[in-house]
Amino acid sequence: MEDPRITALNLIRQDKNYQDELWLKYWANGGSAGSVEFGAYLNSESRSDSFDLQILRWAIDDVIPAGVPLVMPSATVVIPAGSPSASPPVP
């Protein structure tokens, strides 16, 4: 399962308002990071307490309406011209 901090950061990249909403749900469910530390917690690459990560998952579930997919940042794929997978440009 993906680290919920990555999911949270992707949500915040889509809409900055998610940060406050996520933190509020996270804190209400017993999360340990205060509002000032929350951004640093999300960007931390250090190993976090598994229960704290579960609390963040709950917060994400509370914020994202059921059935609404999370839009992940898209990657640009470059296929070299002449490649068997390359197709002619669409006018």
Image (cartoon, rainbow, N blue to C red):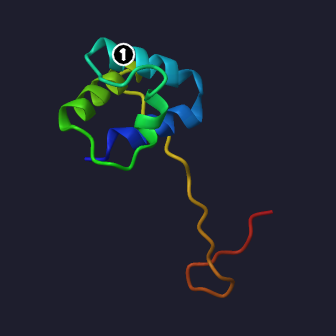
**Residue in the picture at 46% in, 42% down:** 43
**Residue in the picture at 26% in, 34% down:** 53
Q: Is residue 1 left or right of residue 39?
A: left
Q: Is residue 7 left or right of residue 77?
A: left
Relative image position of residue 41 (x, y in whole percent): 40, 35
Q: SS at mark 1?
A: helix
Point out the residue furthest to the top here.
28
Residue 78 found in image quarter = bottom right
Query: Is residue 16 or residue 31 the one in the foreground?
Result: 31
Relative image position of residue 55 (x, y in whole percent): 26, 26
Residue 13 found in image quarter = top right
Vertical placement of 50 versus 83: above or below?
Answer: above
The answer to whether residue 70 of the structure is visible from this angle is no
Relative image position of residue 67 (x, y in whole percent): 36, 27
The answer to whether residue 1 of the structure is visible from this angle is yes
Point out the residue furthest to the right here.
91
Mark 1: give few (<14), some (14-19) or many (20+) Cα within 10 Å: some
**Residue in the picture at 40% in, 20% down:** 34
Query: Is residue 90 or residue 30 the one in the foreground?
Result: 30
Q: Is residue 91 left or right of residue 43?
A: right
Relative image position of residue 38 (x, y in whole percent): 44, 28
Residue 59 found in image quarter = top left
- The quarter of the rendered structure image containing the C terminus is bottom right
Point out the residue furthest to the left here.
51
**Residue in the picture at 61% in, 62% down:** 76
The number of numbered discs placed on residues in the rendered structure image is 1
Vertical placement of 30 versus 79: above or below?
Answer: above
> Which amino acid, mark 1?
Lys
Point out the residue furthest to the bottom here.
82
Q: Is residue 20 left or right of residue 61?
A: right
Query: Is residue 3 or residue 32 the one in the foreground?
Result: 32
What residue is disc 1 on?
A: 25
